Amino acid sequence: MKIAVATKNVGKLDEFKELAKDTSYEFINIPESIEELPPETGTSFFENALIKAKFISDYLGIPAIGDDSGLEVDALDGAPGIYSARYSESGLDKDNCIKLLEKLDGVKEGLRSARFQCCLVGYFKGNIIKSYGSLEGKISYEFKGKYGFGYDPVFITKNGLHLAEMDKDKKNKISHRSEAFKYILKDLSKLLN
Ligand code: ITT
């Protein structure tokens, strides 16, 4: 079965492709002709992931998976949360991280706890499946690492490494996205019922 991955984020797509390697499904990119996904007008990761999945599934006529994810920082009352991609004015990964470190300026190490959240939604002809995953850690004081995307350079995992110090294989062993992926795989066949 072909399933479209409803994302324009190359970092997410790379991780998906790696996770999908050992499955019997064929995960495909959305066509280049789709320049933008619809606006994320939802109030939760679930609602936004559904917007993406439904749009792409209806457009291509095949099942699609949408991923809405983000970072929740306790000292910032859960921000940037569903606004993670649009946190800084430019929305660029580097600027988002810089803004986050500025917001946490002066916050002590013990109070910098945070977690990545990921909601995956599968959609086809009105059928909806969903799953969640999360990854606990804390926000660093500096950038470190060359892998990954988004907030990976400023997120320290339980093992003390920044997420951007882990290559795709290592990140996929622990990440919020891989946890959600593991759960949604079990339900994918329900999309065709
Ligand atoms: P699509 O909507 O096209 O999928 P997006 O980047 O806009 O791409 P989101 O709206 O879900 O996706 O925003 C998620 C943001 O949260 C993303 O831009 C990253 O900055 C951050 N994020 C999510 N997962 C991450 C991860 O595994 N590592 C680092 N940052 C992550």
Image (cartoon, rainbow, N blue to C red):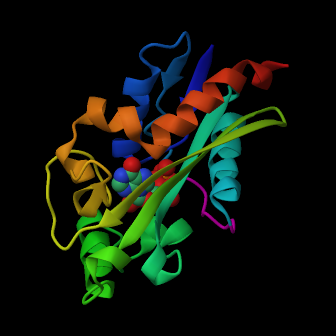
Q: Start and end of the magenta stretch?
A: 36-43
Residue 95 drawn at (x, y percent): 26, 73
Quarter of the picture containing the C terminus is top right
Whether residue 189 sits left or right of residue 144 in the image: it is right
Frontmost residue, 30 versus 49: 49
Residue drawn 33% across the image and 86% down it: 103
Residue 109: which quarter of the image?
Answer: bottom left
- The answer to whether residue 36 is visible is no
Whether residue 69 sits left or right of residue 129 in the image: it is left
Whether residue 71 sits left or right of residue 158 in the image: it is right
Residue drawn 32% across the image and 38% down it: 171
Residue 92: which quarter of the image?
Answer: bottom left
Is residue 39 inside the magenta stretch? Answer: yes
- The answer to whether residue 192 is visible is yes
Residue 183 drawn at (x, y percent): 62, 31
Q: Main secondary structure of the magenta part?
A: loop
**Quarter, ligand 1:** bottom left
Residue 188: which quarter of the image?
Answer: top right
